[in-house]
Image (cartoon, coloured by chain):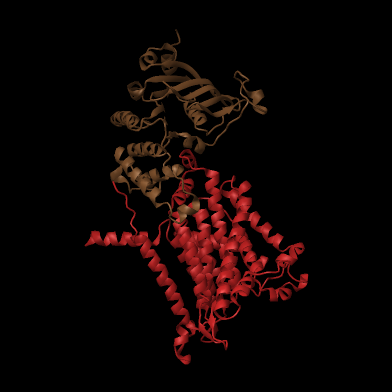
Amino acid sequence: MIQKKSKKGAVTALIACLVLLAAVILLENISLFLPAGSVPNVLKPTSQLFAVLKKGAVYSLAAVSMNLLNGFTGLFSLGQAGFMLLGAYTYAILSVPVADRAAVYYLYGGSAVNFSFQDMFGSLFGAEGLGGAVSLGLGVAISMVLAGCVAAAFAYLIGLPVLRLKSDYLAIATLGFAEIIKAVFQWQALGPVTNGANMIKSFPTFSSFNITRADGTVLLRLSTFFPFLVSTICIAIICLLINSTYGRAFKAIREDETAAEAMGINLAKHKMLSFCTSAFFAGVSGAMFAMFVTNAQAKVYTTTMTYEILLIVVIGGIGSVSGSVMATFLYVACSEWWLRFLDNETFLGGIQVPFLRAGFRMVVFSVVIMIVVLFFRRGLMGSRELPDLLKKRSRKEAAGS
Amino acid sequence: MNSILRVENVTMQFGGVVAVDNLNLEVNEGEIVALIGPNGAGKTTAFNVITGVYQPTNGRVSFLGDTIVENHPQGKLKKLYKGEHTGDYTQVLAPTPDKITKLGMARTFQNIRLWKDQTVFDNVLIAMHCRTHTNFLAASFRLNHVEEQAQRERVAQLLDTVDLYDVKDEPAASLPYGKQRRLEIARALATQPKLLLLDEPAAGMNPQETQELTAFISRVRGDFKLTVFLIEHHMDLVMDISDRIYVLDFGKLIAQGTPEEIQNNNRVIDAYLGVAEDA
């Protein structure tokens, strides 16, 4: 009996990813090709649309990495913001150009880490033109991978004691870890490395990836494309992992730990693998978050951030990667863009519309979330993936015809 | 005949309750051995000690000639311990169930424990995970497709042997009870065991299903060159297929022997039916 796994699905997914990335580049640069007066507001580079797309790309990776742990391995962890913080700081510390370090760390008389990958490659390939682009790309890529590695290394150390705990206890322990990390990074004594409670800035951000002419005007925008590229690659790797033999073992642990152990799956090892992998990608998304907000500051990575991501995972469906991604963009678009009008005092025909004032957006938002949680208990997708839905539909159509 | 499993002086206490009391038994290669006894006699506890779920209060379990579980009363338990202490156990070995499974001992559960949302095919495939040699990264980047392919083909073969190939894409929870039992055995077989431990495989089955299961176990034993150690309440099944039988009552071994010997043993009859008051 031959059990061929069809390659068709993988090829379709690859094409879909490439189409998505191409669409992002097109969308972002369409304003460059239109005559200056006729660009609709929504397509201007300052439009909310691009902020939402960038943040969505960053958060979708954070949500998928959380889903890997909470949804696929069944470990309820709330340390996401802590790992993102580790990634953000690692990236920031390794990427601030040496020339700018004195200005960034002025309170501490300069930085203890006096090198950056971008400068290192810059001295190899030259800092201008193509050489500059290569050294920027390599510098950012290596810093991001290291950001993930640092988060994973911390996850390993935390995991040794913490992964013996189950369900709520694990959640509390990881939540505590995130808070401790946040406090430690604001500690004055670490100032020369972490800049204390002040922000680290001046490192390459998303807009550093725009290709500009010598006079400073933009030739090709890649600032939205970059986070999409990184998130697509990382999420693809997570998907590959989930469908590998180790991913199947994770699902077995989620569904019945006792049976999994009796079938020869080493619980400690597999939980640790899942925890570290999740932390790695959380670290990468943290690095991207720092690029998105153009600074790294410990006080941003609060428990609220973890809850935000958890909410996205729950809305999207625990155990569904595509659900998490869709929910991220919906959530970010609603909170940053579509529901903004609720915060503005509005007058209709001379009468002020009741309730609309600063802060009302969050009220509506909470109600929406309650409705989702009450009536769509398994989230948008449950544990299904997008291809499953399409498959089912085509089967139904075949049966109907 | 070589002994494949040997249990020596195993006592399992939960606080003051002695669930298994100084149990000694031996399973030889190629045999089908049954462990029977009234409800609460400690049969499943004995299984859990053998497979590493519990650490025994005292005693030793050897598998294929090597000691795999060993303990003697320590600390607080020393005071509570009610059995004889032989004193010659110096080493304490307490491997987790997954390590014991890797040594070649696989089990099924009394209350079926399949991975319910996974398909029948995946249930068996996941059980093969413990025999993969690929590391985490190589598996994630699909550098193991030769091994994976071989595993998939073995799963298909295995499902064909247990007559479950036609339902391979169904979720495990949707199968009827008898098929779930068979799937659990198939899943245990996928870990490539030498010794198969079945915890009440016929629980909740009607006579017809029990008969099928009896035939199934004998066939599987032949096909996979297995030794089978089972707990069972259905006497027809036990008497039909076992080579030897051990009887437990209140944690103590009260009889052992061939099915005929057990059927005529007065202590066993008393344990099952109760002692008449005027006797």
Q: Residue at x 62, y 66 (%)?
A: A91
The answer to whether residue A201 is above or below residue A395 is: below
Q: Residue at x 59, y 80 (%)?
A: A128
Quadrant containing the N terminus of chain B is top left
Locate residue A127: give its quadrant.
bottom right
The answer to whether residue A184 is above or below residue A195 is: above
Residue A333 place in picture, x, y as percent? 50, 72
Residue B184 place in picture, x, y as percent? 39, 38
Q: Which chain is red?
A: A
Specify whether B242 is left or right of B47.
left
Specify whether A375 is left or right of A108.
left
Residue A166 place in picture, x, y as percent? 57, 46
Of residues A84 and A338, the one nearer the viewer is A84
Locate residue A185: give its quadrant.
bottom right
Specify whether A302 is left or right of A40.
right
Specify whether A379 is left or right of A143.
left
Q: Is residue A47 visible?
A: yes
The answer to whether residue B52 is above or below residue B175 is: above
Residue A366 place in picture, x, y as percent? 54, 65
Of residues A130 and A386, the one nearer the viewer is A130
* Furthest-top residue in this view: B279
Q: Report which colour depicts chain B.
A: brown
* Furthest-front residue in this view: A124
Of residues B3 and B84, the one nearer the viewer is B3
Instruction: Give the total of numbered labels.
Output: 0
Q: Is residue A378 visible?
A: no
* Furthest-left residue in this view: A401
Quadrant containing the C terminus of chain B is top left
